[in-house]
Every structure is written in C-alpha cells, then in structure tokens.
Image (spheres, helix red, strand yellow):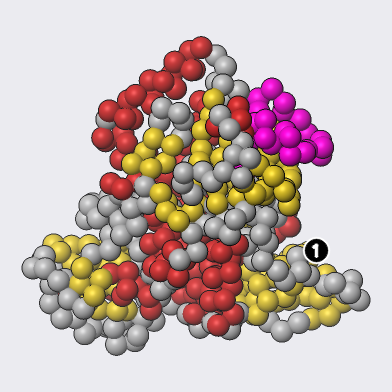
Amino acid sequence: MNGTATRSSVIVVGSGPTGLLLAGDLATAGVTVTVVEKRPRKINNLSRAFGVHARTLEQFDARGLADQLLTTGGTITGLRLFRRLSLDLSTLPSRFPFLLITPQYEVERLLERRAREAGVEFAYENEVVGLRQDKDGVDLDVRGADGAVVTRRAAYVVGADGHRSAVREAIGLDFPGVSVIRSLVLADVRLAEKPEGVLTVNGRGDAFAMIASFGDGWYRVMGWNRRNEVSDDAPLDLDEVKEITRRALGTDYGMHDARWLSRFHSDERQAPHYRVGRVFLAGDAAHIHSPAGGQGMNTGLQDAANLSWKLAAAVQGRAPEGLLDSYEAERHPVGKAVLRSSGGLVRLARARNPLLRAARALVSAFVDMAPPVQRKALGQITGIGYAYPAPRGTHRLTGTRAPDVALRDGRLYEALRGGRFVLITPGTYKGPGAREGWLTAERWASDRRTTILVRPDGYVAWAAEGADAAAIEESVARYLGSGVSL
C-alpha cells in the first residue's frame, strides 16, 4: 500500500546525535522538519561514544546547552593515547579546557528534548526504502511498522542514519575503506574497586582497555586483544573482558554483573561526496573511523552545526550562491583528516614491527617536548584547531574558529544563541541584516578596531581592519544572502 504524507521542508533520516542537533537547529530557525528513524522511540544506553570535546561543547554553548550537559558527567584535563603519550587539555584556549566524559545517551536526551520543544516531528519505526529527487525536491519512500509504504516529500533530505546508511545507498554513493581493528569488545559492568578517575585508558603489550563511568555505578569497558581477533558473532563472556583488562590495566577492578556484552570491528571509511543534488550526508553516514581520540560523535555534531544554518538559509530563500556546496567543501577535508589522525594512532598502537614501535616512542617523546606539535595534536583531537578554506587575499581570521571573546554585553557564544550571524564592530551597527533580524550586532568589550562577521556555527565569515560603514554593509549583504537589502 502506498500513500503520500505531509510535506516537510527538510527530512532528517536518523535520530542519533548528528540528526538531532541538525533537526533542532532547523526547527529553531523556523524550518519545518521531520526526523525519520527506523528504531522504536527510546534512548539507547548501549551507545559507544563517551567523550565530548571542547569544540563540541562550544557548539552546545552557542545553543545554551553546554551547562546542562556538563551536569551529566565528569571532566578530565589529560588525555592518554599511549602509555608514554599524553596531552594536556588544560592548555586549550577555550571556555572548556577539558574532555567531558558522559555517555552518548545523555547527549541524545538533551538534543531530543530541544528538538521536540522546537517543534520537530518524529516518525519512529519508519524505514527508508526508496528515494527520488528532482529539481524541486526529494521523494522519500518510508515503510512503517504496519508494513505500509508512504512517500514523504521534502525540499531537502539529510542522511544521518549511520554507517549502514539507507540514504547513502539510495543516492548511489560508495563507502570505500578498510577495517582497522577486527575485534573490539564492549561490556557494561559493575566494579568492586573504583578506578581513580572517570576515564581509565592504557595499552600494554598486545592489549588495550578503556573504562568509563556512567556515573550511576555502572561502567563501560572497551578492550582489544591482538592475540584473539575473531569475528563479530563469536561468543563473548565476562572472563574474556576481564583478561583483556588485566593485560592492559594490570587489574580488572573486580568486574562483575555484566548487563551487556558485545563484540564489534572498527572500520575506516568515507563517502566520496557529502552532497548529491538535494540530498546530504552527515555523521557516520558520511565517515566512520577508529575510536582513537574519541572523535566520532564529535565530528558528526560538527557536520550538523556546519550544515544546519546553510539549509535554513536555502529553505528561507536567502542563501548566497554556492552556500550549500560549501558544506562538502568544508567538512569533507575535516572528515579525511580525522580518518588520517585516528587511523594513525591505531596503527602506531598496534605496531608489531620494531621500527614502528620505535616510531611510536619517538612520536611520544617529540609531542611531549615540542609545544607546537602538541598544540596541533590538541587542535585536531578536540576540534578547535580546524579552519575552513578562505579565498586568497582575505583577512587572516577568515575561515578560522572564533573564540569566545568578550563583548560589551556578554560574550560571543551567548550572542550566537539566536542562531544568527554575529557582527562585532568597534562602534554601533544598525544597518542591513540587523534590521531584518538575521544578524546580531555587537561591540567589542575592549578598544579593538577589527570588525568580524561570525557565522552561526562560530567560524569567521569575514574580517577587516578599520572597515567603514559601506564596507561592512556590503559584506553583510554578501554573506547573509539575497534577502538582505541595502
């Protein structure tokens, strides 16, 4: 049986963190959004992600959500990658100089509540079974729990439906890559002995293990044993998890009462494109990589932050030419860099070759000794070091992450909570954009003379020294789109 459902401006497929952030942003901007999810409605407490990095916390801050999320977990200021390699997060130039350890379901719970309050429609137990697009929109065939297939029409569709993305398959994109770790184990357990911190990580010999606290007496354990790499469907018991943990950490902390055990493999893959016509990919549907550095969920959330304001502008008829194309141009290189960095960490950790082991020791020593190298590593892992391509001849700040600078009335990431561009000037601005309500105009708290235009995702769109009113108005009109009148 086929039918036609109500049209939405945007359909987001997938209700994980990426899809929820994207949908909430769009709805907050006044766009009609439907989230299609094949699972029943529930928050999955078996999700794998546990770390929220500084740049993601800044994005949550720009939505008024960071302080709420911080109450759900604990923080650490040191991140250990190998036994001899650790990174000092306390040096980060951010309001959040740490890693927040909180389970992914807390992130999803917060983002789902925001999306619902903003008016997002959720269609659970709806599986994508077909997709067609034309110059005006996209038809998405979804099969409900009763087996009936309904066609939903939207101006745009975003596939945020994970590494087995039905949307990616429907638009004919490959997902090339390799498996980097063939057998990881996961377990939720109780411990007789409490670890010293909220996150315990180490690798020793042929084993690696991580223990993270849920905060309620349960702990998530992830481990790997080079000597026992088996298929995902091989039986797993608590004794094996204990053995891996003892090898890597020297103790199993009296592990008992496992409520969940699972085995999986870790792939390293990236779609060749993030956009095909009116269909976009984000999060794990676009890229997956090893858990090294805890960058997976964070990278997907950054995808969503980049795409949401651009889609809103397109739906509302105020997107400058090429704006939607800039999503792939900006985020695909970041996805590739994350694959390269996380994959490199895994390969060094797995090294059997004496030369590679020596290289690992050299890398560890060099990073510990060289501040510029450590800053670059910190910037990549936490996300604050990424910048987007800028046209030749533009101001050095163009394309860079905007720090949370002090303003005459508050700070930048508070000003970004309206989901609009923020213009920071030495003087008062009341021109185009501010009049239409698509721009928040602010003044520096200091006597700084630079004028900067900050995008809704917290990156600098334009900057100039000593710009006059005409130059500012021209740039505002150019970056905010055709809806702004001079």
Front position in the image: 32 or 366 = 366
The answer to which quarter of the image holds residue 276 is bottom right
Q: Is residue 84 left or right of residue 145?
A: left
> Residue extending furthest top?
354
In magenta stretch: residue 235: yes
Identify the residue under disc 1.
129
Expressed as whole percent of the image width and height from the top left, the position of residue 400 reads 31, 54
Q: Which residues are magenta?
A: 220-244
**Disc 1 secondary structure class:** strand
Q: Residue at 32% of width from left, 73% of height from top?
A: 414
Q: Is residue 386 left or right of residue 168?
A: left
Front position in the image: 124 or 281 = 124
Looking at the image, residue 117 lies above or below residue 479: below
Locate the N terminus by quadrant. Answer: bottom right
Q: Residue at 54% of width from left, 46% of height from top?
A: 194
In magenta stretch: residue 246: no
Q: Residue at 60% of width from left, 27% of height from top?
A: 247
* Residue 299 visible within the image: no
Q: Residue at 72% of width from left, 28% of height from top?
A: 229
